Amino acid sequence: MNSDPIRVAVIGALGRMGRTVCEAVTQAADLELAERLDEGSDISGLAGGGADVAVDFTVPAVAESNVHDLIDAGVHAVVGTTGWDEASLGRVREHLARAPGVNVLIAPNFALSAVLAMRFAAQAAPYFESAEIIELHHPAKVDAPSGTAVHTAQLVAAAREAAGLGPGPDATTTALEGARGAEVDGVRVHSVRLRGLVAHEEVLLGNPGEQLTIRTDAFDRVSFMPGVLLAVRSVGRLPGLTVGLDAVLDLGR
């Protein structure tokens, strides 16, 4: 016996990512596109069965507020909007503790290649003396570094710390402001904004005499859709807050 389709609302449905998500949901046999909402739409209308899951692809300035509104409405949230930090994630965790049965999945990146690149970078990081990250995106992106690059740097830094590695070698004593990029937990992250790009990231790992480059390239927004749909189908069984798509992929340890 077939189960009922998962009813999906898309917040930010008029944006480029939102339109792509709407099309992907419409084409999936086990999903139903219940609502198309713009960034400023009233989310409270989803309460009482308007949707089972809402997908948020808006902007960092409104994403957290949207998530809290969805929790209040009793709707699971899948969030691709970046700009999250530990403080904002903590507020979501606290809210979810008061709303049992409602779950949130926030992913820095839904492209499967990017998720795998982050995992590979964390696995490789303990074996290299130096680690830096370059992220390259289209010029309409409003945040820098990207959420993916920040998350990658955090994973790399944690792996290096667990292995007992100190800071990478760097003899720089004078530099123009920003020349060495941003620093995320001790890992340098460099942002490029260039017409013609979509979403790209390089993790550079170096030892004397050798270099490992891990690169992921998204040439079209459709590359994110398998991950988004996987998250939509999975969020209902992931209690509380889940950060990253790793939890729904069988990547092992």
Image (tube, helix red, strand yellow):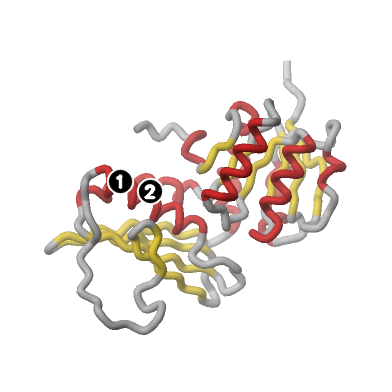
**How many residues crowd around disc 2 within 10 Å: few (fewer than 14), some, or many (20 or more)?**
many
Res. 22 visible in picture: no
Please determine whether, in this image, residue 70 is positioned above or below residue 153: above
Image coordinates for residue 47, horizontal then vertical, percent: 84, 36
In percent of the image, x 58 and y 29: which residue is there? 238
Which quarter shows the C terminus?
A: top left
**How many residues crowd around disc 1 within 10 Å: few (fewer than 14), some, or many (20 or more)?**
some
Q: Amino acid under label 1? A: Ala
What residue is disc 1 on?
159
In percent of the image, x 17 and y 60: which residue is there? 207
In percent of the image, x 32 and y 63: which residue is there? 132
Image coordinates for residue 198, horizontal then vertical, percent: 54, 66
In percent of the image, x 74 and y 55: which residue is there? 12
Q: Secondary structure at mark 1?
A: helix
Label pair 2/1, CB-CB below 8 angstroms: yes
Please determine whether, in this image, residue 107 is positioned above or below residue 252: below
Please determine whether, in this image, residue 71 is positioned above or below residue 215: above
Residue in the foreground of this view, choosing between 120 and 220: 120
Which picture quadrant has residue 140? bottom right
Q: Is 53 situated left or right of 226 in this image?
A: right
What residue is disc 2 on?
155
Q: Is 246 situated left or right of 223 in this image?
A: left
